[in-house]
Amino acid sequence: MILLVDLCFRPRSLSRREFVDPIAGILSRSGSDCQVVHFFKLSEEAVQGADRIILCGTALKDDSYSKRIDLFTWIRDSERPILGICAGMQVIAAVFGGKIFPQPKIGLEGIDIVEETPLLGPPRRIEGYHLHNFGVTLPPGFVLVAGSPDGVEAFQHPDRPISGIIFHPEVRNRWIVEKFVSL
Amino acid sequence: METDSVACLITMVSADPDSYMFHTPNVAWAGLIADAIGVPQLSWPTLGEEEAELADLREAIASAKERYGIDGIVTGAIESVYQAVRVQRICRELDLWCFNPLWQIDQVDYLKLLVSEGFEVIVTGVFAYPLDESFVGARIDGPLIKKLEGLRDQYAINPSGEGGEIETIVLDGPIFRRRVEVLKAVKEYDNYRGRLIIKEARLVER
């Protein structure tokens, strides 16, 4: 079972349909079971019961998740595969000592994959959909997988299967979610 | 709309029927639909010129913010990155929330949902091969959805018309207080381009 963590500003918000349901749809079409839990209501039981965890994105104007990083300290000790998407990547960065800072980007843009990983594959350029007001600094020890140190597009934990992407794979890059499930 | 309330409907009235951004067939009847739902309409003219029409949309949304105190807008974008990105940028400039609750939804599932929820939707325009004259004015129901699903598989038609292949009008639905009755309409069709032009319509009790 895959746990989808809804990072939107409130449970059952209108944003959930835009940022969580499309990921659930990709998982469903690839034959995976998933459970959606809002981050306000996330229990240890839900985390422990998951095989994999995806932290979903939020609306452009929504930064409520960044004010409650204390609710995500469980990520630090998790051994499960975790994928952070946009806001989810920002949360992972903050938990591991990176910084969230203003760096707005909207639209389709080229993304340079600079490090081969099981999730994103070999170095090459892909096109990805960006919708964020904030970027991150690379947390200490993390591997820069795509982008540059000043514009981190994707990163990975050095030892554990924890990854983050700042762009939205539900648009034009559904294969990333499918790949995450199959790793 | 869950816990949010709808303050107004914004209608962009494009002088160019082939606007990149805006729906144009029968847009003059959007005011009647607003009345049917019981929500005020903010109608805004635009020449419909590529990119310049975005300045008009920005003005319209800014006006809605001023007149109705809106906190954000809701669009029906499903797949169009072109449209979604431009609306997102305008909302960011105006410090408004932007919601796209249908974003990336499976288009056939969406059409089925409309029918199961009780929306009455008819096709008012077709603009792609192999959509024939029978689609113009047709009601979206189970058999039509099946047909569109087949055309998706065979010709890559977007079943909900997200690529501009089909345009529609909604005559009734669960959020309507009264329904729209079309009294007189004229069909035009030639070479896989067709329109249903509504000449007379009125509101009737549901």
Image (cartoon, coloured by chain):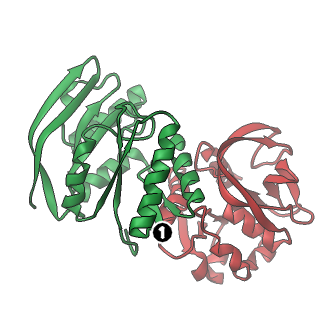
Chain colours: A red, B green
Left or right of residue B64: residue A29: right
Q: Is residue B136 visible?
A: no
Total numbered circles: 1
**Image mark 1: chain:** B
Q: Secondary structure at mark 1?
A: loop
Q: Which residue is mark 1?
A: B71
Q: Residue A113's x, y, as percent?
A: 80, 43
Residue at 76% over, 68% down: A92
Q: Is residue A109 visible?
A: yes
Q: Residue A138's x, y, as percent?
A: 86, 61
Q: Residue A75's x, y, as percent?
A: 75, 74
Category of crowding for the residue at label 1, using alpha-carbon neighbours closer than 10 angstroms: few (below 14), some (14–19), many (at least 20): some
Q: Residue B155's x, y, as percent?
A: 40, 26
Residue at 81% over, 54% down: A152
Residue A77, quarter of picture: bottom right
Outermost residue, top side = B191
The quadrant the C terminus of chain B occupies is: bottom left
A8 in relation to B104, above or below: below
Q: Give, as a three-letter code, the residue at label 1.
A: Asp
Left or right of residue A96: residue A19: left
A17 in relation to A182, above or below: below
Residue B17, quarter of picture: top left
Outermost residue, right side = A141
The quadrant the N terminus of chain B occupies is: bottom left
A42, B195: nearer the viewer: B195
Residue at 40% over, 72% down: B4
